[in-house]
Image (tube, grey):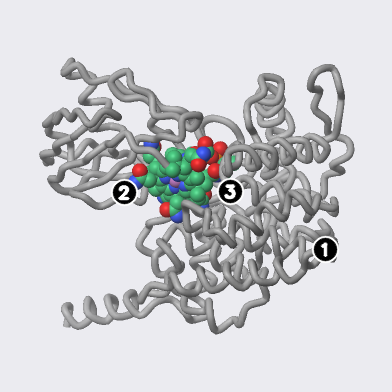
Amino acid sequence: MLSFVIILSFLAFASGCDTVECIQEVLLSLNKDLLRSLDTQDGLPNPSVHLALRLSDYHNLGKENEHLVKLKTHLHNDIQNSLSNNKPVTGRLALYIMALKSSCYDLVTATFTVNEAKDTLLTNLKRQMELEKEHILFTHRPLTNYFQYSLGVLALCVSGIRVNNHVSNKLIKAVEHRAFKNFDMHAMAGMALQCVKDSGSHVHSAELDSALIKIKQTILASARVDGHFGNEFSTGLAVQALLAMGDNPGDYARSLDAIRTTARSNTYHNPMAISQILPALQHKSYLTLKTKECLNEDNTLLLGPTNPVVVLPSDSKVDVNIEVVTSNGAHIVYSLDVPKGSSLLEALELLNSQNAGFTFETETSLWGPFLSTLNGEQARQGDRRYWHLSSDGTALKEGIGDFRIEAPQKITIRNTSY
Ligand code: B12
């Protein structure tokens, strides 16, 4: 009898989540996780999380307003500093603008002062986009990357600002020449270009249409057997892009089910990941911001008391080899035992504390700690290099803060160009 029940529950789990109850349960659970992250997240308030909470049908208006205040102070000051120091900030500024817009905040009232000139956020973003465009002209690459370039176009467009044709043309050309290094860039470009198309401001409509078709084909061609587009962390944005491009709902119904099934296996714990899938699960894309009105909003999302989770260090140890391959090809392997279930970050900290001559540094990002320096060697965005992570030859789908070591393995950290 017991085994029958186990088999039944396994089948229910494996067959996805497409009943009304299951769909609603997953949605509310992710929405609450995201809301809870406002209190638990270290570092700067996250504009992508704010955006997703505000695009949801369910709200906790008190907590969302508190977060808005934090964005307008902490994130605002951080972007101001980057602008003052000429650091590229396109993606963050774009997300900040979209977060404010999602709260129906009057964008004209927020300003940055750069070189003694006080300008609105949108004027500053337009200026960043000009810098990005110039950079493409001279180096064939944006100052940041095409994901952030698309975010910039999208933020201007959903705010009703006419996007300079030269700026959108660079994105169209990038699609045409297959210049995107990461699959997720297609989704963001799809939303940006669809917004430009809908605004009617673009003069080369044939090129624009053909770029949109190419993006749609690329996304659809990436469908996995389980319904995900790209990987589990790409599907939310991919579905958002298909929704924005007015695709046939049949094309992404399976993907929504795949997201829910993955959510039930507890894969989406990083708030950034949840923030990219939650709008898709509610059949919304970032384009819905264009018409967002903050009227008669629901205010029923409550967080019950949480039982403090005490994580006891695991008794069982796992044997890991950490191989570091530097830019000149030299490699060194460190062996250590870590408690089962440790994050890769915890393993690196342990290795560092063992005085094996191993050091590392991280930079904060919206996704958590980004590994930037190993044994004194930096792999930096400015040089188009990064420390690539893989386990037994397979690229990790998560960063050092999220990836958990459950079994013996060799983790390779390689200084790689992109
Ligand atoms: C561009 C990009 C990169 C570029 C970033 C540099 C650049 N200028 O182009 C490079 C190639 C370096 C990169 C590296 C990695 N990436 Co990446 N990346 C992206 C992408 C497409 C856009 C990020 C961005 O610009 N966001 C916009 C700005 C506003 O946000 P931001 O936080 O300020 O951006 C910075 C960080 O996001 C950081 N970053 C980029 N990727 C990652 C991954 C992790 C885990 C962390 C902590 C930070 C980080 O670089 C951004 C630019 O400075 C996203 C796609 C997505 N859906 O978000 C994937 C994405 C974030 N990356 C991902 C992964 C897995 C990685 C790697 C771990 C891959 C690997 N096996 O090594 C490494 C990070 C390793 C490390 N050293 O810590 C996953 C993360 C999933 C997850 N659950 O954590 C994503 C979602 C792609 C995907 N669908 O799988 N990435």
278 is higher (above) or lower (below) than 22 = above
Q: What element carries label 1?
A: loop
Instruction: Find disc 1 in the rendering and name its residue.
Output: 203
Residue type at mark 1?
A: Val
Which quadrant: the N terminus? bottom left
On screen, residue 126 versus residue 52, left or right, reads right
Q: Could you tell me residue 354's position as x and y percent?
A: 17, 19
Tell us which disc is closer to us: 1 or 3.
Answer: 1
Q: Residues within 10 Å of mark 2 (few under 14, many from 20)?
A: some
Between the residue at mark 2 and the residue at mark 3, the CA separation in whole angstroms equals: 22 Å
Which quadrant: the C terminus? top left
Q: Quadrant of residue 157?
A: bottom right
Instruction: Find disc 2 in the rendering and name its residue.
Output: 396
Q: Do the residues labelled 1 and 3 touch (CB within 8 Å)?
A: no
Instruction: Find disc 3 in the rendering and name its residue.
Output: 146
On screen, residue 234 versus residue 371, left or right, reads right
Q: Could you tell me residue 214's position as x and y percent?
A: 58, 70
Answer yes or no: is residue 78 visible. yes
Q: Residues within 10 Å of mark 1 (few under 14, many from 20)?
A: few
Mark nearer the N terminus (1 vs 2): 1
Residue type at mark 3?
A: Tyr
Residue in the picture at 28% in, 32% down: 346
Residue in the picture at 43% in, 33% down: 369
Please tell me which residue lies in front, 178 or 62: 178
Between the residue at mark 1 and the residue at mark 2, the CA separation in whole angstroms equals: 42 Å
Mark nearer the N terminus (1 vs 3): 3
Tell us which disc is closer to us: 1 or 2.
Answer: 1
Between the residue at mark 1 and the residue at mark 3, the CA separation in whole angstroms equals: 21 Å
Q: Could you tell me residue 30's position as x and y percent?
A: 51, 58
Residue behind label 2 places its C-beta within 8 angstroms of ligand 1: yes
